[in-house]
Image (tube, grey):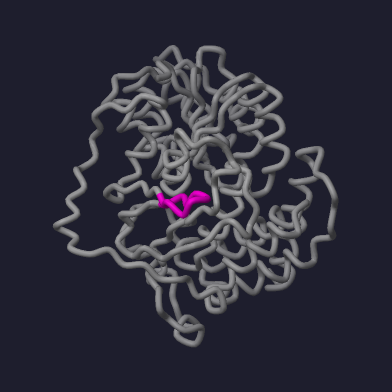
Amino acid sequence: MKESLSILGSTGSIGTQTLEVVRGLGLNVCALAAAKNIVLLEKQIREFQPQIAAVFDPLAAKQLKTAVKDLPVKVVQGMDGLCEAACLPTAGLVCNSVVGMVGLKPTLAAIRAGKDVALSNKETLVAGGALVMREAEKHHVRILPVDSEHSAIFQCLQGSPGKRAVRRILLTASGGPFFGKTREELQSVTPEQALKHPNWNMGPKVTIDSSTMMNKGLEVIEASWLFGVPDEKIDILVQRESVVHSMVEFQDHSVIAQMGVPDMRLPIQYAITYPERIPSQTAELDLAAYGSLTFARPDEKTFRCLAACRRALRRGGLAPAAANGANEAAVKLFLNHKISFCAIADLVWEAMERQPDVERVNEVEEILEADARARSFVLQKVKI
């Protein structure tokens, strides 16, 4: 278990739950980072007394510096500040829960500084999977998954004799708030309806991604990079109760599942304490109280974001970065009532297919350029 942590995205849903875990374990926090919520960040700084506090927004960083001038904390800003927080020498583990493409550079910075990374920032592996995993291997660091599904797969694989023993990964999905709906029924969905997830408490962007099933498509891409398996070896099962977090089937058709109550603090704690298991703040799983667990296949024709991500993974290169960038731009437009719910998938598909094929991604700038092109395409298409 790492004694000192750098927590990027500390004011978001995963970040605040990470700090709950840290508080319960009595660990030290050497760095905190946030986008611009300096009211909450100041409270966190006063409680956890980090060496560094990074704020992505320059104006907010200036305000924070004034607010905490009585404390011995160094306030830094922008992408350089995030990367500094990710590379702090005293950090034993970097927890990256930043939302969006902004998380890619700090992840690479932490890896190149020799830091293990507890990763919940999907975009890091979706857009930059090949580059990130090459760098992790080169610098001999571990990427410890925090997403409940990838944590589950990681746990199921403990003790596995190797990749050849794995027949397929069974990635579970809650199905979001619109499971079973037709495309026609989804045309009039509002942001307020899409933000009501039945099982999980998450930030707005991730919650919208769950409602479109884009999150599951992104997780397919992540799983492919994390566990070294191709798209055809990753199946998705809708598990409405969110109790079975994912499964692994082996060559002998034996299936190992990881289960627990839907509480993100469990995979967060496992990433922090790995390979140890110690008492947690999460509730016990009472299967008798559930009575039964249900499984179904996803409807990829209705929830087209999922199919778009599979297509992007098969194409490789910069196609996943384009799909991700288009989705981030489209979700923002949807939350601002600028486009319809179903338009999100349409824009993701179109932007992804417009991305030219490339054989190998060598530099982070290539990824960021593909991301920017996809976002620009979405805005031009919607005429914003």
Magenta: main secondary structure: strand
Q: In the rendered image, which quarter is residue 173 located in?
A: bottom left
Q: Is residue 203 above or below residue 272?
A: below
Name the residue located 54 percent from the left edge and 29 percent from the top edge: 117
Q: Say if residue 57 shows up in the picture.
A: yes
In this figure, what is the number of numbered marks? 0
Asked whether, in this view, residue 161 is left or right of residue 277, the answer is right
Highlighted range, magenta: 246-255
Residue 118 x, y percent position in the rendering: 49, 32
Name the residue located 59 percent from the left edge and 30 percent from the top edge: 82
Quarter of the rendering occupied by the N terminus = top left
Q: Is residue 250 above or below residue 3?
A: below
Q: Residue furthest left?
A: 289
Asked whether, in this view, residue 154 is left or right of residue 103, the answer is left
Q: Residue furthest bottom?
A: 184
Of the pair 297 and 95, the residue shown nearer to us: 297
Quarter of the rendering occupied by the C terminus = bottom right
Residue 218 x, y percent position in the rendering: 57, 55
Residue 243 x, y percent position in the rendering: 30, 54
Q: Is residue 378 above or below residue 141?
A: below
Residue 195 x, y percent position in the rendering: 39, 64
Asked whether, in this view, residue 52 is left or right of residue 282, the answer is right
Is residue 297 one of those drawn in magenta? no
Of the pair 253 and 286, the residue shown nearer to us: 253
Q: Say if residue 101 shows up in the picture.
A: no
